[in-house]
Amino acid sequence: MTNKITYVTALTTAIENPSALTSAEVEKLTALRESIAKRNSTKSTKPTKTQVANENYAQDILRTMEKHTIYSIADIRREVESLCDATSQKIAPIMQKLVDAGKVTKTVSKGKNFYSLAE
């Protein structure tokens, strides 16, 4: 019975002693790399429904916010009609994306986050 070269054995050899790789193990690892590259290249880059919805919410927030006005998440929930039923846990990541994009600034006072339009 011949020993089959598996991905696990090839990876184990590569990690523990890379100079001891046999040509069969190199071939097996090359095939693994190619299959992973192929799988990654066919992944969809299309945004999910949640990402599309959050982008729409972000646009609603930006349209509603006024310059030189500071908003808490509760204020945003009251002001933005499309987010009136949303939780703080839903609004906070949307606001963080806006902060990361440089469209909104965030300040923290007494443990509470406040947001204003970036200038």
Image (cartoon, rainbow, N blue to C red):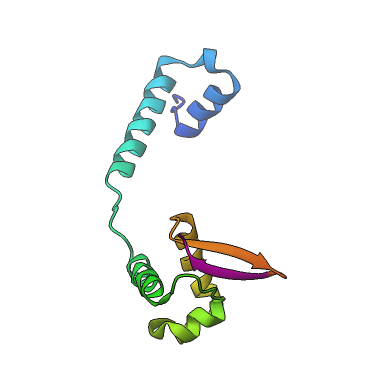
In this picture, residue 80 sits left or right of residue 115: left
Quarter of the view holding residue 82 = bottom left
Give, as a single range, the part of the protein colored magenta. Answer: 112-119
Q: Residue at x 27, y 46 (%)?
A: 42
Q: Residue at x 53, y 17 (%)?
A: 18
Was residue 78 drawn as part of the magenta stretch in this picture?
no
Q: Residue at x 37, y 31 (%)?
A: 33
Quarter holding the C terminus is bottom left
**Image spot of residue 118 (x, y percent):** 46, 61
Whether residue 1 is situated above or below residue 73 in the rendered picture: above
Predominant SS of the magenta segment: strand
Query: 62 and 95: which one is in front?
Result: 62
Furthest-front residue in this view: 68
Whether residue 78 is situated above or below residue 3 in the rendered picture: below
In this picture, residue 42 sits left or right of residue 62: left
**Image spot of residue 45 (x, y percent):** 29, 53
Whether residue 99 is situated above or below residue 2 in the rendered picture: below
Furthest-top residue in this view: 19
**Image spot of residue 13 (x, y percent):** 54, 23
